[in-house]
Image (cartoon, grey):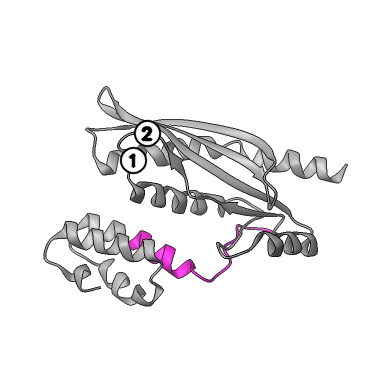
Amino acid sequence: ERAVRDKHPAVRVSAISSLRRLGAKEALPTVQRATRDRNRSVRHAANGAVTALEAIGERQRGPGETRHLVAVGMPGTKADRVSRQMLFDARIFLSEKLIELSGVELAPDDLSPADAKREIARRRLRGYYLESSIVTLKPRGNGVRAVVSVIVLSYPGRDMRAMLRGAATASGHYSAGTAEQAVQGAFVGALRRLPQVLAVAAAKGRL
């Protein structure tokens, strides 16, 4: 928390990212103050951290009546240039995009498979687990190109339901910012078909 007030912006960003990654909800007031930092990168990191920390312990759901309970795994990668922080941020981004979808509720991280099975049965939901990967991330021309995959599995079982793929290019020289833009754009592309996948699965379940 002291590092969030360091004189160097890079140190402040790193400290905020660490508090977010650790799930340090008790540090929320400190992070909230950083949303008014004079440095744009610090404000960006703080805004994202506030959203993530405020959500800890709360059920996150999209609009409408809940029909799908979705668990999101930590993304993997075999690509160069992908840091652990980038994978963590990608998981947060995926979760944020999911709760924009009607009928989706995110499964808490501490929900055991047995409890998930009981909850899905009790509430008559359909359960899904998303495994994702940053397949490639590298400079391309005057930008950064990312390719990602998202595998839709049943939950709490892990039977494959669909594989989604997305790609995007962010303009500009390679940096953490352009890499993040490319990865997020690729995941947006991959998730475009997810509502259709969920609708088809739900229709099959009613037959």
- For the residue labelled by badge 1, is the local secondary structure a helix, a strand or a loop? loop
Quarter of image, res 140: top left
Residue stretch in magenta: 46-65
Pick out the residue farthest to the top.
Answer: 141
Q: Name above or below for residue 96 compared with residue 31.
A: above
Looking at the rendered structure, the number of numbered marks drawn on it comes to 2
Q: Label 2 belongs to which residue? A: 79
Q: What is the three-letter code of the residue carrying label 2?
A: Ala
**For the point 25% across and 25% down, which residue is it?**
142
Q: Judge left or right: residue 186 versus residue 117.
A: left
**For the point 67% across and 45% down, which residue is it?**
158
Whole-percent x and y of residue 31? 31, 70
Q: What is the three-letter code of the residue carrying label 1?
A: Val
Q: Judge left or right: residue 98 versus residue 16.
A: right
Q: Judge left or right: residue 10 versus residue 97.
A: left
Circle number at residue 49: none
Whole-percent x and y of residue 184? 41, 42
Q: Does the magenta stretch include residue 49?
A: yes
**For the point 82% across and 45% down, which residue is it?**
205
Whole-percent x and y of residue 76? 45, 42
Q: Label 1 belongs to which residue? A: 82
- For the residue labelled by badge 2, is the local secondary structure a helix, a strand or a loop? loop
Q: Do the residues labelled 1 and 2 touch (CB within 8 Å)?
A: yes
